[in-house]
Amino acid sequence: MKNVNSKEVSVLVSGPFNEPFDYVLEDKNTNFSVGQVVLVPFGKRKIVGIIIGDGTKTIPETKLKTVLQVYDLEPIPKPSIELMNFLASWYCVFKGLVLKMILSPIEAITSPDYEKVYKSNYPNENEINEFEKIKITYKRKLVLDFLLNFDIGKSQNDIIKHTGVSKAILRDMVQKNIIQEKKVFKNRNLDSNFLTNSKENKKNYDFLNLEQKFAVDRINDSIVNTKSDCFLLDGVTGSGKTETYFETVRTCLDQGKQVLILLPEIVLTPDWEKRFFQKFSFAPLVWNSEITKKKKKKIWLSALNGTAGVIVGARSALMIPISNLGLIIVDEEHEQAFKQEENVRYNARDMAIYRSKRSFAPIVLASATPSLETFYNAKKGKYVHLTLPKRATGATLPHIKLIDLSVHPADKGKWLSPLLLDEIESKLKNKDQTLLFLNRRGYAPLSICNSCGNKIKCVNCDTWLVEHRSKNILVCHHCGYSTIFENICKKCGAEGQIKAYGPGIERIEEEINETFPQARSIVLSSDTMNNHKILSETLSKIKNNKVDIVIGTQMIAKGHDFPNLKLVGIVDSDVGLSGGDLRASERTFQVLQQVSGRSGRHSEKEEDKGIVLIQTYDSKNPIINAIARNNRNEFFDKELMSRQYAKMPPYSRLASIILSSRLERKLETFSSDLLKLAPLFKNVKIFGPAPAPIYFLRGRYRRRFLIKSDKNVNIQDVILNWIKKIKTPNNVKLTIDIDPFSFM
Ligand code: ADP
Ligand code: ZN
C-alpha cells in the first residue's frame, strides 16, 4: 500500500460526503498509509474518517485543520476501499455513508477494549530488599518474581492466572508504588487461534462423491492460485453443497487466509453453527443483528488484524474490513434478503462478487434454486457452473402431484382439499411428519364487515389489516401498526359482523386441530418464532419427532433438514403469481421448490418416497407445471425467453426513482416537474411517475419512476444528470434504487 509522506493528507469522513477534505498531520505522525483511520475536526464536531491519499495542496497549509488522532489500527484494506468506491458509484450513494458501514461498530475504533498491564518498579530483587519500609509479603513477592521476567509488563489476567493473587493485592501494590499500572489497547493480540485450528483437524475428503470432489478441486485451485473466479454451486437441497463448500473453507484456512460466509439472516441458525463446529472443532465468528456490540467489536478488530479465520454473517458482514480474505461463500444466493432496502440500497451478493475480484479470491454462490440472473451468467460462461445433481444421502427426490381445487375443492369455509386431508391422515397413521406451507402470516388476510362491506384498512397505509387471532389483534404487515380486534365496524357501527376472508396459517392450524384433534401441530412463522432460542428449540422438537404437523410460512422453506418429513402440502400455490413484479414467478418457483425439497430428504426406498401435494386453481400455469415435473431448467429457459421478449433484466438494466412525501400535493407537483425534465435517449425508457402499488405507506404518499435502458447504457449517469436539473424540495424524499428488487 502506498505511503503518504506529505504532512498534508486527504481524508474521507464518514457521513453524507463524496469528496475528501484536506487536513494536516502533526509532526510526530509520520509515514501513514492509505486506509489509516483518523479522527478529524469537522465543523463543531469530531468525525472518524480514513486517509485516502496526499493532500490536494489547493488550500494553504496554515488554513488546514489538524488531524486530532491517528488510531492505532491496521489500515482499512485496499479491497474494502475499492468496494466503498464502487458501491457508492453503482448505487448512487455517498462514499462517506458506505464508509460509515465499514467503520461499524464505531466503538471498535473509538473505544477499543483496554486492559490493565502491570510493571514492576524494581529492576531486580536486591533493590527491593533495600526498601525496608515496604513489607514484601509472600503474595507481593509472588507478583514481583513473576514480573521480573517481563520488562514490558504483564496483563492483569495473566498475573492473576499465574500467581493466584487477587485484584485487590495488585491495586494495593500500585498504591504503595511497588508496581505501576498502565492501560493498553487490547486489539493487537486478539486470540489468534482461529487460523491454525483447521490443520489439526484435517480430515481427508474421500467420503465426498465424484461431483462434490470435482467441485472442491476446482474451487481449491482458484483459492491456491488466488484467482477470483465466480462459481455457481448448483444442487438440489440435500445434494451436499454445504459439505462441499466446507472443504474449500478448510483449504482457504490452510493457506493462512480468511473466509467470509454470507447467509440470509434466517438461515444462520444455531443448527448451522453446530454443524460448522462439528466439522472444524472451532466456532465461526457469527455476525448478525442479534449479537452484542462487544462481540461485533471483537470480530471487526480481529478481521482487520487478520486473526479471524471464518466470519459468517448476514449481508452487512460484507462491510467488515477483512484484511486477508481468501474466499467468499454466498449461500442461498437467490435470497432477497441480500438486498438492503433502506438507507444505502445495495445488493450484498453482487457487491460480494466485486469484493472477491478486488481481493483476488474466488467466490462461491450456492443455491438449489439460483436466481435467474445467476443462472444466466453461468449459462453464458461468466460464472463457472458446478452441479451436484443428486441427493448426497442417496435419498430420492419427492413425488409431486397437483390438486386441482376446482375439481377437488375443500369444504365450505375450509382450505384443505379432501385429497390432501387423506394423505395427511395416512402419514399420521405411519407416524411420518407433514408440513403445510402457506406464505401468509396471521389468521386471515382480509376482514370485511358483513353489514356494510367495509374492508378494514391500515391507518398509515393503503393496505388491509391482517387478523392475528392468537393475539386478538389486527396488524398491518407493512408498517407494523396494530390495534385490538374489537369486532365493531368503525364505519357502520355494527357489532360482531366482521368476518375473516381467506386463509392465513393460524386458520390452517384451526382446521388441522378440528380435523385431527389427536395430532401434535405447531405453527412456524416470524410471529411465533421471534428469537433464535424459540426457533432452535422448535426445530429440534420437529427433528426429534415430537411434532406431527408443521404449519409454516416462507420461514420453513429455508435450509432445515427434517429427517421424518414425508409429506409437504402447499395450501395455495397461486399466492404470489399475480403480483405485478418482475420476479414474482421466479420467486414463487423458488419458494415452492425449496419447500418441496423438504420432503423425504432421507427416504432411500422408492416406496418410502417423499410426497408433495400442490393445491391450485391454476393447474395449467407453466410455473406450477414446471415444479410438478421437477424441471427447473425448463422453467428458467421459459422465463428467460419472456424476459428477453419484454426486454427486461438480464437483457436490459432497471432502476427506479422513488419519491415520497407526507404532503400529497408537494409530491404531485414535484413528480410532474421532474417528469418535464426527463431525458430523451433512444435506448432509455422512462415510465411513470406511477403511484407505487401501495400508494400510501407508513404515512407517506409514494410515486415511482421506472427507468429501463439497454445494457451498455450508464443508467446511473442518466439518472444523476436528470435529478441534478432540479432541487428536491425539503419535504420530498428522493431515493434511487439501482437493480430494484422491490416494486412496492
Ligand atoms: P445442501 O447444502 O446441498 O442442502 P448438505 O451439505 O446439507 O446439502 O448435505 C445434506 C446431507 O447429506 C447432510 O446430512 C450431509 O452431511 C450429507 N452428505 C453430504 N455429502 C455427503 C456424502 N458425500 N456422503 C454422505 N453424506 C453426505
Ligand atoms: Zn400500515
Image (tube, helix red, strand yellow):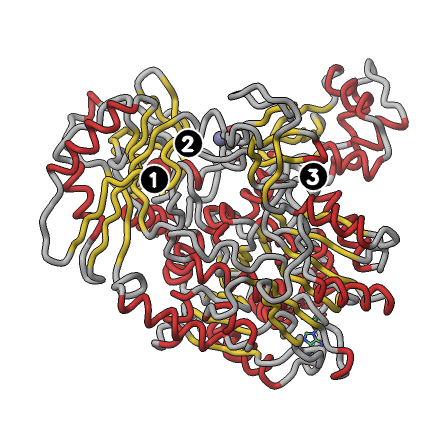
**Element carrying mark 3:** loop
Q: Residue 357, which numbered label?
A: none
Q: x%, y% of residue 164?
A: 86, 34
Crowd band around label 1 with a 10 angstrom C-alpha radius: few (<14), some (14–19), many (20+): some
**Amino acid tagged 3:** Phe
Name which of mark 1 and mark 2 comes first in the sequence: 1
Q: x%, y% of residue 476?
A: 54, 33
Gap between marks 2 and 3 measured at Cα: 64 Å
Q: Is mark 2 within 8 Å of ligand 2?
A: yes
Name which of mark 2 and mark 3 comes first in the sequence: 3
Crowd band around label 3 with a 10 angstrom C-alpha radius: few (<14), some (14–19), many (20+): few
**Amino acid tagged 1:** Ala
- Describe residue 193's horizontal placement relative to residue 519 as left or right: left
Image marks 1 and 3: residues in contact by CB distance under 8 Å: no
- In the picture of the structure, the residue carrying the numbered disc 2 is 697
Q: x%, y% of residue 453?
A: 51, 32
Q: Is residue 613 visible?
A: yes
